[in-house]
Image (cartoon, rainbow, N blue to C red):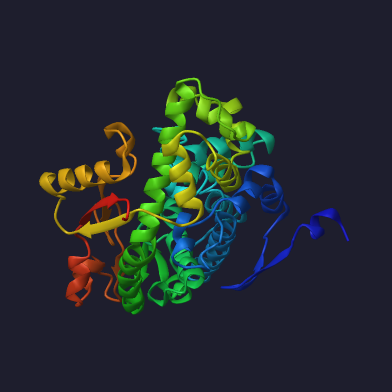
């Protein structure tokens, strides 16, 4: 058996069954330490504090996305859309690496460890570095990922209102959380894909699956991603890191891994994020954060130790979610009550009593559209094509406001 044949592995996925690694290049990218790090990055942050099964990782999600992309390419080729082997491989690479820039706990710490850089920008940085290592073999994948390739529909398969990323994360997060509302029919949606005038469209027979997809996305956001327990735990983690940074800036030496210590000691932003920083970022994952938090429980700073203990033992702050902004009077009343109760200074109490908001938009047609293709040749946005009135309603952003404070 040649070395190349040995790289055509088959993985067993609980959702799709057997997933085939299509070629040796993809195998080598999966084996790379940058990609292997995703095994140690949780897919849905602190959702496991609500749904005990939600311990799946970005690694599983990326592999699942690649599998769906293989199905999409095959479907479109069967319908006469020409996709060369080179283009297909580039699509697999682009979707495989689309989330490689996520930091610990995925979205929860996105702007806490590195300031002002999105995970998409870090993913692109990783792809460009890997392209150097792999002698330019990722060039086309990067072009597609950035939306610069001539064939526009290829970028839409990676990033749009109906991309392989969304098709996998809704189905996967639904499976691992046990929240059945997100269990969309990804097979049906992919089977209905087509390309007209270089735009990705959905054949009219797929309209009901698309409606369920949009509704499923809305429900998953409110039931899983924005579940109040996950939201408050994420906010507490952000506050904990803010406190840690504050202490380090005052010269306090906090126990942490070398990689985590680097980001605590240095403010990393767009202008100083370079290859050396990328390599340290590649050593940082959920384990560094959790290990440090466990250590910080015994720290003499009471804000740091209290927040650490609350997160580790799931003794979270109380959260009240409302449809209207939290009134100043109510916030001040709670703030005063808790200051007297806990004997903390105003500055310390700000870590435990705070307000914020969350926003969900199930379908945003201003970014890209889910276009329905009719046999007559007519193409309509799903909000016009659907006779289900709530699809139109789901295009509007919904904002909810919350206040967090310690329980009695």
Quarter of the figure that contains the C terminus: bottom left
Quarter of the figure that contains the N terminus: bottom right
Q: Residue 345 in the image: x percent, y percent?
A: 30, 33
Query: From where the camera sits, is residue 269 visible?
Result: no
Query: From where the camera sits, is residue 27 visible?
Result: yes
In the rendered image, the residue lying farthest to the top is: 251
Q: Is 175 in front, or is 61?
A: 175
Left or right, 220 with reference to 104:
left
Q: Is 332 in front, or is 274?
A: 332
- Looking at the picture, does residue 105 appear above or below residue 127? below
Left or right, 233 with reference to 258:
left
In the rendered image, the residue lying farthest to the right is: 1
Residue in the picture at 40% in, 72% down: 182
Q: Residue 328 in the image: x percent, y percent?
A: 12, 44
Q: Residue 320 in the image: x percent, y percent?
A: 25, 58
* Number of residue marks: 0
Residue in the picture at 37% in, 47% down: 235
Q: Is 150 in front, or is 118?
A: 118
Q: Quadrant of residue 3?
A: bottom right
Left or right, 242 with reference to 342:
right
Q: Is 153 in front, or is 305?
A: 305
Residue in the picture at 55% in, 43% down: 289
Q: Residue 226 in the image: x percent, y percent?
A: 34, 59
Left or right, 103 with reference to 280:
left
Residue in the picture at 21% in, 55% down: 399
Q: Quadrant of residue 294?
A: top right
- Looking at the picture, does residue 111 appear above or below residue 69? above
């Amino acid at each position: 058996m040649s070395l190349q044949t040995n790289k055509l592995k088959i993985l067993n996925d609980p959702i799709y069954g057997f997933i085939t690694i299509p070629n040796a290049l993809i195998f080598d990218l999966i084996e790379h330490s940058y990609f292997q790090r995703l095994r140690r990055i949780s897919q849905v942050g602190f959702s496991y504090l609500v749904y005990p099964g939600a311990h799946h990782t970005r690694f599983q999600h990326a592999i699942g996305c690649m599998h769906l992309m293989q199905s999409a390419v095959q479907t479109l080729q069967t319908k006469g859309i020409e996709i060369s082997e080179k283009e297909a491989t580039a699509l697999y690479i682009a979707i495989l690496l689309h989330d490689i820039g996520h930091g610990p706990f995925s979205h929860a710490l996105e702007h806490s460890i590195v300031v002002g850089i999105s995970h998409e920008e870090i993913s692109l940085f990783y792809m460009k570095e890997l392209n150097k290592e792999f002698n330019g073999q990722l060039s086309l994948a990067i072009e597609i990922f950035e939306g610069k390739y001539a064939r526009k529909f290829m970028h839409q398969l990676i990033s749009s209102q109906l991309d392989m990323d969304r098709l996998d994360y809704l189905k996967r997060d639904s499976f691992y959380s046990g929240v059945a509302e997100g269990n969309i029919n990804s097979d049906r949606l992919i089977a209905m894909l087509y390309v007209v005038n270089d735009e990705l469209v959905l054949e009219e027979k797929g309209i009901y699956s698309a409606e369920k997809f949009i509704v499923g996305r809305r429900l998953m956001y409110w039931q899983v991603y924005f579940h109040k327990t996950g939201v408050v735990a994420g906010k507490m983690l952000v506050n904990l890191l803010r406190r840690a940074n504050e202490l380090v800036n005052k010269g306090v030496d906090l126990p942490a891994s070398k990689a985590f210590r680097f980001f605590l000691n240095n403010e990393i932003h767009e202008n100083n994020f370079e290859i050396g920083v990328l390599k340290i970022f590649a050593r940082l994952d959920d384990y560094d954060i959790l290990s440090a938090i466990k250590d910080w429980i015994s720290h003499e700073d009471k804000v740091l130790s209290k927040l650490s203990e609350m997160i580790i033992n799931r003794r979270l702050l109380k959260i009240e979610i409302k449809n209207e902004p939290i009134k100043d009077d109510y916030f001040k009343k709670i703030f005063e009550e808790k200051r007297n109760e806990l004997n903390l200074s105003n500055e310390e109490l700000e870590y435990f009593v705070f307000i914020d908001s969350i926003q969900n938009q199930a379908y945003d047609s201003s970014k890209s559209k889910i276009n329905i293709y009719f046999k007559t040749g007519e193409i309509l946005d799903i909000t016009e094509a659907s006779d289900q009135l709530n699809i139109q309603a789901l295009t509007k952003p919904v904002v909810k406001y919350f206040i967090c404070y310690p329980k009695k």
